[in-house]
Amino acid sequence: MGTPWACVGGEGPPRLPPVLTGLLVTAVGLELLYVLALGPGPPTPGPPAPVLHLLLGLYQALNLLVNLGRFLRSDPGIRGVVLAGRGLGRGWEYCHRCQSQVPPRSGHCTACRVCVLRKDHHCLLLGRCVGFRNYRPFLCLLLHGAGASLHAAALLGPALAALLRAQTPLRAVALLLTPWLMLLTGSVSPAQFALAFATDTCVASALLCGAGLLFHGALLLRGQTTREWARGQRGYDLGPRHNLQAALGPRWALVWLWPFVHSPLPGDGVVFPSARRP
Ligand SMILES: [Zn+2]
Ligand SMILES: [Zn+2]
């Protein structure tokens, strides 16, 4: 009947969450530079170490920026996707908010105001949904976010340990847990506060990204989305190797290491091979 399926309104997800996350990351990055350049930085390493740290930092920054750009640029929703004539099969549903038939594994997001192809979850920190089109950069962000956070924490660790050894046990614990309070009460200098806060943030970020990577790595091998895992569904598990190829493309082992590896995703996010025969 000529229904314009998937012609959903043009409003995208809210922009405030990624802006706030960007401001936090920028603040921590500036504090890291401040601590390393001016504050009580780490002990001077051996001759090759600064170059290696610099090269590793540049590699991590490149991976983070390229994958973040790809994640934010890709629209995981059904906007503009040609769905007409392909639906009404098994697993298709009608979304009253989008006023469209939507394919299996998709789901409506109230924050993004659209149905998302192979919806995994809505990422609060990045302010948009993780779905078929942006799952790969999301996973790479988790990997390199954990790596960069661990790297920064390792750079700051020796200086923080030396600072904590010079404090009483009570002040050391307070500095670790409430650095803002210690700064506001004048108990520590700005450089000491920056060292404690930047290290705290890096450790928390490494734990968050590491836990996310382990969780999504397990889902990746099982061919599940987070929503399917929560519902106990496992209808698209093709075996670990094929699951990796379905989510990351044929060069699934290399895309983690270099963001410019060409590895086109099989499929279109609308039709998925099922593990079960109908
Ligand atoms: Zn919808
Ligand atoms: Zn969303």
Image: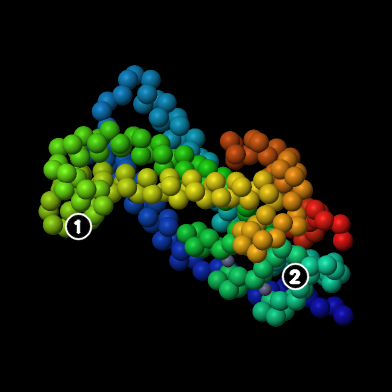
Q: Which quarter shows the C terminus?
A: bottom right
Of the residues shown, which amino acid type is indicated by label 2?
A: Val
Task: Identify which residue is drawn at 84% across, 72% down.
Answer: 88
Secondary structure beneath dot 2 equals: strand
The count of marks equals 2
In this view, the residue farthest toward the top is 47
Among the two numbered marks 1 and 2 on one chain, the one whose residue lies closer to the N terminus: 2
Between 37 and 224, the one nearer to me in the picture: 224
Report whether the residue tagged 2 is closer than 8 Å to ligand 1. Answer: yes
Task: Identify which residue is drawn at 45% across, 30% down.
Answer: 55
Give the image location of residue 222, x and y in percent.
68, 49
Give the image location of residue 223, x and y in percent.
70, 51
Relative to residue 199, is residue 2 drawn left or right? right
Residue beneath disc 1: 181
Residue beneath disc 2: 102
Q: Whereabouts is ligand 2, in terms of quadrant?
A: bottom right
Task: Identify which residue is drawn at 72% across, 63% down.
Answer: 105
Of the residues shown, which amino acid type is indicated by label 1?
A: Leu
Report whether the residue tagged 1 is closer than 8 Å to ligand 2. Answer: no
Give the image location of residue 167, x and y in percent.
14, 41
